Structures are given as C-alpha cells and as structure tokens.
Image: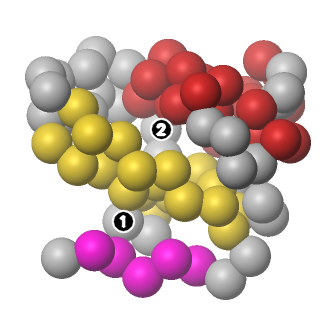
Amino acid sequence: MIPAQPKDSYRITLELLSKEPRLDSVLMRAFREQKDNLKLRVLTRSEFKNLFKEKRILIKGQPANPSSALAAGTTYIDVLGF
C-alpha cells in the first residue's frame, strides 16, 4: 500500500536492492540525482541536516531519523515544504 502524500511536500521513492545502513546518505544521493526539484538538488549539507531537525522528512507519516537503516524494497519519503 502506498501512503498518502502530505500536502505541500515532495516525494522521493527509493527502490533499494539491499539493506542500507543509513537513511541520510541514501537520501542525499537521491536528492542530487532527481531532476524535478532544483531546490532539493542543490541543498547544502547543513540545510539537509536541518530538514531532519525540523522533522520535515517523513517515512510513513512519521519524522525520520538520519541514522535509521533502510530495508531492501520500496520506501516512500516525503519532504515537507517542497
């Protein structure tokens, strides 16, 4: 089941072939590779950290932790305010 996307958010869909030890490194790479949202593509490291601190990165509607591991498969991440 695909979770509903919050209003005024940008969704990143991660398709992982294997478990990843940290969300932040995978997500930063996904931001750089996507072509739909220039603001996220050029985000600085400190701005990226602030998204986590301000609880603007959600997985399944819950604030994400940058050090969380990700399981293989599909993960939907919503970034509020983008």
Q: Quadrant of the C terminus?
A: bottom right
Q: Quadrant of the N terminus?
A: bottom left
Amino acid at pointer 1: Lys
Q: Image height check: is 27 above or below 57?
A: above
Q: What residue appears at the point 59 percent right and 51 percent down from the top-left corner? A: 57
Viewer-side residue, 41 vs 64: 41
Q: Image height check: is 54 above or below 27?
A: below
Query: Is residue 67 visible to the viewer in this orientation of the structure?
Result: no
Q: What residue appears at the point 26 percent right and 20 percent down from the top-left corner? A: 20
Q: Are marks 2 and 1 in contact (CB under 8 Å)?
A: no
Assign a secondary structure to mark 2: loop
Assign a secondary structure to mark 1: loop
Question: Which labelled disc corresponds to residue 77?
Answer: none
Image coords of residue 5 (percent x, y): 51, 77
Left or right: where does residue 81 sit relative to residue 28? right
The magenta segment is 2-6
Query: Is residue 29 visible to the viewer in this orientation of the structure?
Result: yes
Question: Could you classify mark 2 by the number of other residues whose Cα lies within 10 Å: few (under 14), some (14-19), or many (20 or more)?
Answer: some
Q: Mark 2 or 1 closer to N-term? A: 1
Q: What residue did someone put label 1 on?
A: 60
Q: What residue appears at the point 42 percent right and 82 percent down from the top-left corner? A: 4
Question: Which labelled disc corresponds to residue 65?
Answer: 2
Image coords of residue 25 (percent x, y): 50, 17
Left or right: where does residue 2 sit relative to residue 78? left
Image coords of residue 14 (percent x, y): 36, 42
What is the CA distance from the residue labelled 2 to the residue labelled 1? 12 Å
Question: Could you classify mark 1 by the number of other residues whose Cα lies within 10 Å: few (under 14), some (14-19), or many (20 or more)?
Answer: some
Q: Is residue 51 magenta?
A: no
